[in-house]
Amino acid sequence: MADSTDNSAETSQSNKKSVRGPTMLKAIENVRKTGIKIPLQFDLETGECYGNNASHFKSYVALLTRERCSIAKELWKHIPEGVKNAMWTDIKAIFVIPEFDDAKKSDHFKKIWFHYAGERWKDFKSRLTRTYITDPKPDDVPPYVKYPYIKKDIWEEFVKYRQTSDFKEKSQKGRENHAKNVYPHVLSRGGYKRLEEQMINEKRQSLSKDSSGLTDDDRHPSPPERYETWTRARQKKGGEFTSEPVKKVAEKIEKIVEDSKKGDFVPTGRHDVLTEAIGTPEHGGSVRGVGKKHNITTYWGRSKVSRQRQGIDVKEQLAAFKADLEAKFEEKLAQERKMMQDSLMETLKSMGLSQTSDTNNRVMVPEACAEQVVVTGSAKGSCSPAPVKMQNELKEVVVTESAKGSRSPAPVAEAEDNMDDVQKLLIMVLKKGDDHLDVQLTHCSMCTNFLMSCKCIRELLVGFIWLDMTTISVWCSYIHRLCIENNTTNVYGILEPSFLNIVGDAGKKSDQRISQSKCKKYIQHKLENEKKECQLLPFNHGGHWQLIILCPKINTVVVICSLHWKLNPIMEKIVSSVFTVDQMANGNRKNNTVWLYPQARKQYNSNDCGYYVMKNMLDIVTAKITDSWMEVFNDPKELTAEEMYELRLRWSTYFLSLLEG
């Protein structure tokens, strides 16, 4: 009996159907770690992606949407813009996305793929409903177990809504509308673009079998007609059609094609073979047989009849002609500017640089701000030391560059060959021979007479110490410049970290630490005089950097820490006091301030906290994040070496531009 039981157990185990787990795209994550972006091919007019990596791109967009967008939201438009912008930033970090000079074209291109992401998000929710709610199977594991990005409480909220009468009524209407589609297709996710490529390859292969007497046009067949792709998309592998109405339309198409060859039917514009066969005109949405990326205007152009009916007079035509000339002139100027920038880029590359440096936007210091900050050295902070061999080589370069007298060219040249672009930039700074470097920072009007000693630069060069007070101050100025370029200076404010460098618990002053009262006064001054949506506060306590974000409009304080620690009690008390006063001054006396601690990118050593603060500030400003902090910053992965190198390169390039300016 025991043997029989064991055999039956083994049989049931072997007969159990194996199912595919959730797609995680580990291969793309491995490519991401290399820092090499995956190339893509796009139709710039329609935004459609095609080619070898198109399937990987679409799969990643769908996966990212499932991970970042909560299924508890009812509609795609309810997903916060901050989440979508963060997704787009992540996509651009992995794939080569086209860059447009026109901001409208860039936004339109992003909108196309957000529409695609919304469709995949909706399909995912429908699949969850069918699998786990409408027709559940007893042996299926719960979705919050199968999918690591679905939390149990979110799933319970999702199930509760899907079982309401409102949703069931909405779902029934959707099924009724779907049943009205009498022309179902069997296209894969490659869509009509992939089908068109497949049909062209089939024509090419059939022609290559008999190459005698073929012209160049025959060897390179033209794309299939619209009626051909429409019919092929509704044929199964065996050749049968997906429905009886499709079969009837296909038979009509054959007859109309024969009539057109005889001259009995002449296609004219939008009234072609497919329109005649189906019997209904094209609507203003997607064009049948070519995919959703095309609409009636992009495929056929604007109707001549409609243009004639508009009755444009001569003055309007002249004005349009003038505007067109001005646009072409501006385009030509832009091309010339780009050529000059490319030339400058090549010059910088020959010097060992890999990024252009822009002149910073200076901010005049008002006379009312009498208090000044003078930073002449590096405050204590964590560091990421270079390898010992590299340190010795760089020390030799530093000593040689700063010493007067004879030089030892061979070791110096050998060391410089081992340098990366960041180190070469810093060597250029040391070659100036100054004891202190006077730079004008722009992020805070109270930050004047900012002096950085060359000793600090040598530390940056030799030990890669990127986490001291002066370094973060320069980074704050760089972030402010990005805000100017992105027209978001009314959204983000950046506080000077040296004014947040408070005295510790023991009350002992060190270096350039300031009293708690001065820190409190400074934050209060910024909130009162700068009505920003978000104030970014880089804060260092005990050698560890954290990022504090004040959001007065939504009465929220966000603390992003790479070790997932709470804020220092002293600074928490200061921020709470200042924020409470500011909220009361703006009439908000009832609601308590919300404190958020997102589980953001996490460091797994004790050295790189400054990098994470720099990266978080950069992501916030570039993705224009102002809310949904817990959803956007919900990624425990550590920074890669390539990401940290990019931060170092951005910092050093900007710092050199300050010296040149």
Image (cartoon, grey):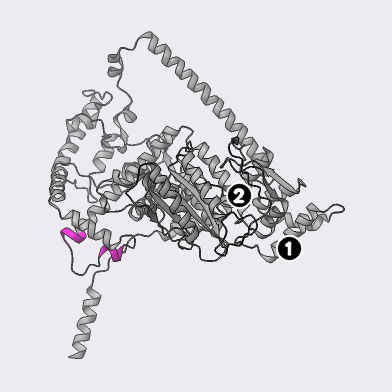
Horizontal side of residue 372 vs 627, given as left or right? right
Horizontal side of residue 281 vs 606, given as left or right? left
Q: Quadrant of the C terminus?
A: top right
Q: Is residue 653 magenta?
A: no
Tell me which amino acid carries mark 1. Asn
Residue at the disc numbered 1:
392
Q: Is residue 138 magenta?
A: yes
Tell me which amino acid carries mark 2. Leu
Q: Secondary structure at mark 2?
A: helix
Q: Nearer the viewer, residue 610 or 568?
A: 568
Measuring from the top left, give residue 360's x and y in whole percent: 60, 38
Q: Quadrant of residue 396?
A: bottom right
Residue at the disc numbered 2:
649
Measuring from the top left, give residue 4's x and y in whole percent: 19, 87
Farthest residue, direction bottom: 1
Measuring from the top left, give residue 89's x and y in whole percent: 44, 47
Region in magenta:
131-148
Q: Quadrant of the N terminus?
A: bottom left
Alpha-carbon neighbours of circle 1 within 10 Å: few (<14), some, or many (≥20)? some
Residue drawn at x 55%, y 28% is 334
Measuring from the top left, give residue 611's x and y in whole percent: 55, 56
Is residue 32 visible in the rendered image? The answer is yes
Residue drawn at x 59%, y 54% is 514
Horizontal side of residue 117 vs 328, given as left or right? left
Q: Secondary structure at mark 1?
A: helix
